Amino acid sequence: MTFNSSRPSPTTLPAWHELLNLKESILKQSILGLFNKNPARSKKLSIQHDELFLDYSKNLVDDQVMASLLALANQSSLSAHTEAMFTGELVNTTEQKAALHPALRGKAEDNYTLNGTPVHEQVKLALSQVSSISDQIRQGKWLGATGKAMTDIIHLGVGGSELGPRMACQALQAYAHPDIKIHFVSNVDGAEILSTLKGLNPETTLIIIASKSFATEETMLNAQSALDWLEAALGLSHVQSSTHVIGITANRDNALAFGIDPSQILEFQEWVGGRYSLWSSIGLSIAICIGYTNFESILSGAREMDIHFKTSVIL
């Protein structure tokens, strides 16, 4: 069945107007007052799924607001949209693309398909590259031009291609490799890339160029600055094809044209949106930081929430 993306604006739905009517009264409430009215509020307005506990009782909502929010979800056909996303329909109507990111953390038995074609093997291949490369780097086996192991990783990207990995690496510092530092650069202002490069040893620095198109202006400008620095310091020509540079992209041809060694190009699919890309090969810097086993745990936890989201019933 083809997904019908045409739908009324949520602001035209009855539940939306109910919420607007409730706005003034709920804003006059206090969290303490709501708890005094309902001592069981914390239990009622919380949920647990596996090891994740969500407590939303400290928000300005009451039974009426929650009922109207659930009504809005139903009137907006949230369940139909959810099913469309999980089955690879073109839910990204702006770009006319699927948003099949749950497949990035799925298993073979989840049977994710796009236009009738299973996608798991593509995902599996990309993750095997992430596993292999991250393990080599963490074990000191990925060597630079002078035979030294990598100690500093510079992840270049913009938007989700940079924010997702940065967030994960910062949040999971307790699991980080003690001898490898991950640096993130997204600002097109040359001051950021220059200050990041300052003090690093070119012999032990790896540049990750993360760009879906491999043509994003900000990312490629920063990449060129980093490559110029490497070439000058190491005396290399065509440094982009050395083990000091890895490309991550959905456009392999552009990465090849740029000069990246074919074995050092990690791919992901066009249906991976930037904000969801950390689950793909874009997450290489995460795997380097915390280890691939821990990266797999992130994927596993996300899959559990995918299943929960897909199968939960909106009352």
Image: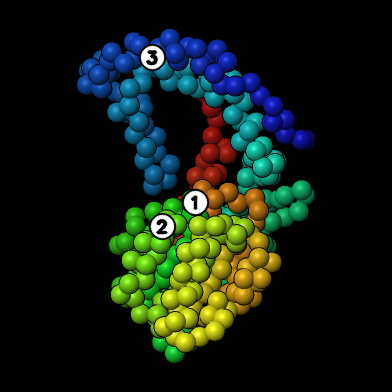
Question: Position of 307 compared to 81: left or right?
Answer: left
Report the amino acid beneath label 1.
Gly
Question: Position of 126 compared to 170: left or right?
Answer: right
- Residue name at image x 66 percent, y 42 percent: 95
Q: Is residue 244 visible?
A: yes
Report the amino acid beneath label 2.
Asp
**Residue under numbered circle 3:** 23
Question: Position of 177 compared to 84: left or right?
Answer: left
CB atoms at circles 1 and 3 under 8 Å apart? Answer: no
Identify the mark nearer the N-term, 1 or 2: 1
Residue 145, image x and y in percent? Answer: 48, 87
- Residue name at image x 65 percent, y 71 percent: 256
Tell me the CA gap for discs 2 and 3: 43 Å
> Which quadrant holds the N terminus?
top right
* Label 1 CA crowd tier, 10 Å (few <14, some 14–19, many 20+): some
Report the amino acid beneath label 3.
Lys
**Residue under numbered circle 2:** 189
Q: Is residue 288 visible?
A: no
Coloring applied to the structure: rainbow
Identify the mark nearer the N-term, 1 or 3: 3
Total labels drawn:
3
Residue 5, image x and y in percent? Answer: 69, 31
**Residue under numbered circle 1:** 160
